[in-house]
Amino acid sequence: MTQLYQTTAGKPAGKQPVVVLAGRPNVGKSTLFNRLLHKRRAITDPTPGLTRDPVASDAIIAGKPSLLVDTGGFKLDRRPSDSHENRLDSLVVERALQAIERADVVVLILAAGELTPEDEEFIALLRPLRDKLIVAVNKTEGGRLLAEAWNLARFGFDRIYPISAEHGDNVVELASAIADKLPARGEAAVSDETGCNTVRLSILGKPNTGKSTLSNRLCAEAASIVSEIPGTTRDVIEGCFRWKGRDFAVMDTAGIRRKSRVSENIEYYSVNRAIKTMDEADIVILLIDAPEGFSVQDKKIAALASDKGRGLIFALNKWDMMPNMKNSFEAARDSLHYFFGQMKYVPVLPLSGKTGEGVAGLLDTAIKMHGQLNRFTETSVFNDFLENVQAENPPPSGPDTRFKVKYGVQVSANPVVFRLFVSRPAAFTQAYNSYICNKIRKDLSYGMIPVTLEIHPSGGGKRRPG
């Protein structure tokens, strides 16, 4: 497996230049990140230390393409050295420093009137990077605290940009300064837009199932922080890689717990952001902790992915920790298919994100599934198919239950949707819907993906996923 590019950790050769936003916690890095992107991409909240993993997105800054990276806050104070939280703080700082090292432009963000020892240490640390450094002093909306902002010139900065990330004051001027420092177009190629040939994966599941470990293995880089602390990943961490000549994009997401157990606003937004990745993905990898087993929450995630028409793979992670017993995988697969009811078409794969066992099979399955999601069946072929399935298993013939499927057409791929025109839509049963969907999978080579039927009379209609 070779890395194509890693959007959360730095700049690869031949890709767009990288702009990194850096600073201590709660100075407004994520707010500025969203402001420069002109959309809400990073989660923002008054809670210090919210951002942990670097979060990146393609951006156009003052007309120039770049990769914009929001980093975790630089912390000077430390908790007891043996605590989980201290190790997590150290990893956050380590990831931020790695991103800064690889950046073309570093925007150091300070808060007006709130200079701290952490700021002073960070300033000293960044002094060797002066040629690529821009200093923005945030929270100066309406001209407040401008004198305090200009006082920061005593640290020897060439120029200071007082801004308000929240209100947009002077952000255009800052963006122009960033663009002026970016390499010329001839020095850094713009990355290709993700096209239909790129396989987009979203890794979903409960907390601590190994999502970040798998994502890091796929991208061949420790982009997501891996920790035994549940809920370590908060935002969506994106990365890309190449496998057997195919481009992949992968989204590592926050763990999804039952709604009743979500008590903090941060977790609420993290879970919502994770669920929304289904709208951007082709395939959802539902990561299940094999030793722990599956749960009702896994069932809800799978149902939502199916309703959206996304490809779905049940990945039994940590399989290396399972007892080495004959037919253990077959038993787990059968139990899972029984638990998930009407989803026997969904592939079930054992793997270990930690050791890499089964990852090749996961990617091969994803490539095959992506082909099925983007398959389009000609109308003539589909109508011949409909005649055959009705001849093989005719619809009910009673006076109140009689209907006939007149003809049909595929109306979309990825998600795969077929529209059926039926003589009496009200009589078209869910059982017959399931029958046709299963035959479509078997006879028309859609064997691993959800299929949706839209049932139409001469006008109007409704959708029935199957």
Image (spheres, rainbow, N blue to C red):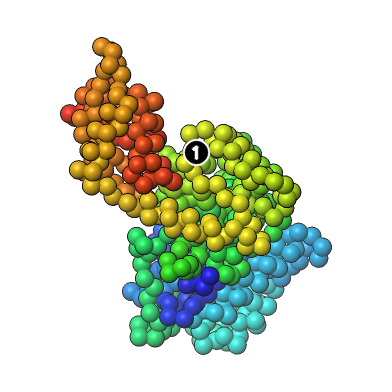
Q: Position of residue 391 (x, y in %)?
A: 27, 28
Determine which residue is flagged by label 1: 344
- SS assignment at label 1: loop
Give the left or right position of residue 81, taking residue 453 as reference. right
Q: Position of residue 224 (x, y in %)?
A: 60, 63
The quadrant where residue 226 appears: bottom right
Task: Examine the rendered structure and indicate whether residue 296 appears above or below residue 18.
Answer: above
The quadrant where residue 384 appears: top left
Residue 164 visible in the current orientation: no
The residue lying toward the viewer, choosing from 316 and 110, is 316
Which amino acid type is marked by label 1? Lys
The quadrant where residue 396 appears: top left
The local crowd at label 1, few if under 14, some if 14 to 19, many if 20 or more residues have their Cα within 10 Å, is some
Give the residue at x 47% y 56%. 366
Residue at the extreme top = 399
Task: Examine the rendered structure and indicate whether residue 446 appears above or below residue 106.
Answer: above
Task: Examine the rendered structure and indicate whether residue 457 appears above or below residue 192.
Answer: above
Residue 348 visible in the current orientation: yes
Give the residue at x 61% y 43%. 330
Task: Examine the rendered structure and indicate whether residue 245 appears above or below residue 206.
Answer: below
Give the residue at x 32% y 49%. 413
Quadrant containing the C terminus in the rendered view: top left
The residue lying toward the viewer, choosing from 273 and 463, is 463
Q: Position of residue 417 (x, y in %)?
A: 31, 42
Q: Position of residue 59 (x, y in %)?
A: 40, 68
Residue at the extreme left = 458
Give the left or right position of residue 24, taking residue 161 as reference. right
**Could you tell me how many numbered marks the image carries?**
1
Give the residue at x 44% y 41%. 306
